[in-house]
Amino acid sequence: MPFDQVSVLEVDGQMIAQEYAISKFLARQFGFCSKDNMEHAREDMYVFLSEDLCGEVEPLFFEKDKDKLAVMMKKFVEQTGPNILSRLETALGNCTSGYLLGDKISWADMAVFSNVGAMEYIIPNESVTLLKAYPKLTKHLDLVRSHPNISAYLKKRPTP
Ligand SMILES: N[C@@H](CCC(=O)N[C@@H](CS)C(=O)NCC(=O)O)C(=O)O
């Protein structure tokens, strides 16, 4: 394993570490990345914005001290979460297809779905309240969730 860490993907005897290197590899392999350099960079910017959300919410999962957790939660719910979620909402403002880029699902849509999903998993009640303020994002998540391949995967995905 390259860094003695998971996530790791082995392809034809070669190992790839780092979640985003793996997901980008798979997205390219299976046609979910644009071949146009600018479009691809635009996909990346949404992917990494949603990664920022995950980076902000993950510490809430690991914090054991209740008082510290309450302070962190307040900051996330009042500031950090809305900062990022509102940017995603704005990004979806002009998307007639409901997807972030063009008229079909891309790596960017899947990353946003996955990273907002991490938030929903870690802070389920707060997420319901937070997401009420972002109708376009909520619709986007429903659209990705209902994609035939994704909904089939979600039905058989092991629960953590
Ligand atoms: N940025 C890395 C983070 C990888 C990571 O921190 N993996 C943890 C498990 S979630 C791990 O393997 N930790 C053991 C170690 O670092 O020795 C990624 O996205 O894959």
Image: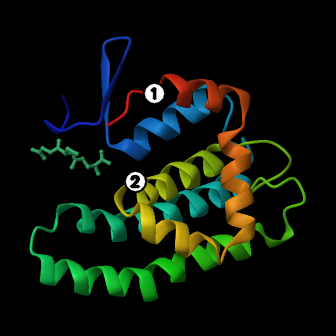
Residue 3 seen in this snapshot? yes
- Image side of residue 136 versus residue 121, left or right: right
Q: Nearer the viewer, residue 84 or 108?
A: 84
**Label 2 residue near ligand 1, CB within 8 Å:** no
Quarter of the image for the N terminus: give it: top left
* x then y, percent, for residue 113: 57, 51
Q: In the structure shown, which secondary structural element does the residue marked by tag 1 occupy? A: loop
At label 1, which amino acid type do we have?
A: Arg
Position of 141 relative to 28 (above/below) = below
Bin the neighbour count of mark 2 within 10 Å (Cα to Cα): few under 14, some 14-19, many 20 and up: few
Tell me the residue that label 2 is attached to.
121
For the point 65% across and 78% down, the residue is 133
Q: Which mark is residue 130?
A: none
Q: CA distance from mark 1 to mark 2?
A: 14 Å
Whether pointer 1 and pointer 2 mark residues with C-beta atoms closer than 8 Å, the reply is: no
Q: Residue furthest left?
A: 65
* x then y, percent, for residue 7: 29, 36
Residue 37 seen in this snapshot? no
**In terms of image quadrants, where is residue 5?**
top left
Q: Earlier in the sequence, mark 1 or mark 2?
A: 2
